[in-house]
Image (cartoon, helix red, strand yellow):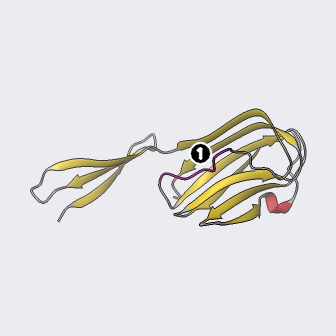
Amino acid sequence: MSQKITIVNPNGSQYQLQINPDGSLAATSAKAYPASQANVFDTGVAANTNFLTTAITPNNTPCALRIYVCLSASGVFSVQRTKSSTTVAEMLNGGVPLVANIGYTFDVPVDASETINFQTSIAATILKLNVVEKDLI
């Protein structure tokens, strides 16, 4: 029977080391955290339309997505969470519209088999959207 040990480097990257029954070692996988999942800059978006052409599928769940967003107009910002064929909208910032030209940061937990996209209640320019996958810890 083999054992696995997770090693965390000072830069946050993680590696799994496997100890085989004969005592030999093997690197079994690497998790590079934080992992960039999406970057959008100066791009127009229609109201209630997904920001991303392809929804985010995290590499290692459970995890958190750290989201930085700045929009050109005030509107309610929401996560579109899909599991199987069901999508639910989760309003961030307590459902209060984000103020135009102000940056906001949110952490959103994501579980296995979920994909994530984003929408806003108004037509706007996405001045910046940055999404990074990170450990929940």
Q: Residue at x 68, y 52 (%)?
A: 117
Which is the main secondary structure of the residues drawn in magenta?
Answer: loop
Above or below, comparing residue 89 to residue 99 in the picture: below
Above or below, comparing residue 54 to residue 20 in the picture: above
Crowding at dot 1, Cα within 10 Å, few <14 / some 14-19 / many 20+, comes out as some
The residue indicated by pointer 1 is: 132
Q: Residue furthest left?
A: 22
In-front residue for pair 47/40: 47
Above or below, comparing residue 56 to residue 96 in the picture: above
Q: Residue at x 58, y 61 (%)?
A: 114
Give coordinates of residue 27: x percent, y percent.
26, 47
Which residues are drawn in magenta?
Answer: 53-59
Give coordinates of residue 23: x percent, y percent.
11, 54
91 relative position to 73: left or right: left
Give coordinates of residue 49: x percent, y percent.
79, 50
Q: Residue at x 85, y 50 (%)?
A: 98
Q: In which image quadrant can residue 89 be found?
A: bottom right
The total of numbered circles placed on residues is: 1
Quadrant for the N terminus in the image: bottom left
Q: Amino acid at mark 1?
A: Val
Q: Is residue 117 magenta?
A: no
